[in-house]
Amino acid sequence: MLRAVPIIFLFFLALAAPRAQAQSVSAYVGAGTATDSACTNATFCLDQPDLIVVGQVDNAPKMTGAFGKIGGDFMFSSHLGFGVQTDFKFTQGDYLGYGYRPLFFDVNAIYHPIPDNLTKGRVVPEIEGGVGGVRINSYISGTTAITGTQSVLLGVSEHFQVHGAVALKLYLKGGIFLKPQVDARYVPNFGQFGSNFTPEFSVSLGYTFGRH
């Protein structure tokens, strides 16, 4: 459900774009990596201490790997707007013999500190800040004669997060842009990993509707 919200949001933004005058609407998709250190406390790893095999906690993984990004924004003035985005690990990672996939979702206020006319609209710096949630799905693999090997959802852990980001929209032609972005997330009591601070680095390709 969390992953579906930005898609629905982008759909309604696209409907609103033809009516926008001074406003603009952007949608983008991208890829990058989010990182966090390894959990070192067996009491909190996975939020399910009964699943932790004694002596294996020292082998708990860092958060790493390829993440996808889907997002969109609506600028209701040349400086201010709002947006949503979701970031998700493309594949399951191994967590002490179990699979895991994190998903981040946030809603943000957006600020463009430099007027477009100073850069001729080709480079648009962007600052974001907001709140959201984190969902960690845990999986276990099993094999049956009928279905073969399959991954079964074992548990879900959800957390609140505070989100901030800095980015550049680099317009290539018309409304088409590249968007390198650095995200910083603070996730209180993020026990599955070693730190409550989770940075992310990504590059997205997007399009701005209603751009003048």
Image (spheres, grey):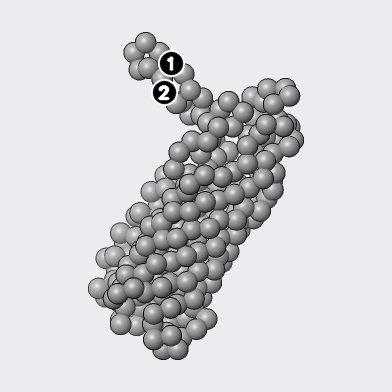
Residue placed under numbered mark 2 in the picture: 150
Left or right of residue 38, residue 132 in this image: left
Q: Earlier in the sequence, mark 2 or mark 1?
A: 1
Does residue 186 appear in the picture of this structure?
yes
Residue placed under numbered mark 1 in the picture: 143
Does residue 208 appear in the picture of this structure?
no
Give the residue type at disc 2: Gln
Where disc 2 sits, the SS reads strand
**Contact (CB < 8 A) between labels 2 and 1?**
yes
Work out whether residue 191 or residue 68 is closer to the camera in this orientation and state it: 68
Work out whether residue 2 or residue 139 is closer to the camera in this orientation and state it: 139
Q: CA distance from mark 2 to mark 1?
A: 6 Å
Give the residue type at disc 1: Thr
Where disc 1 sits, the SS reads strand
Left or right of residue 121, residue 159 in this image: right
The residue located at (27%, 65%) in the rendering is 15
Left or right of residue 26, residue 55 in this image: right
The residue located at (45%, 58%) in the rendering is 85
Work out whether residue 148 or residue 129 is closer to the camera in this orientation and state it: 148
Up/down of 155 relative to 132, above or below: above
Up/down of 60 relative to 185, above or below: above
Coordinates of residue 148 in the picture (x, y in percent): 37, 17
Up/down of 40 relative to 110, above or below: above
Left or right of residue 65, residue 57 in this image: right
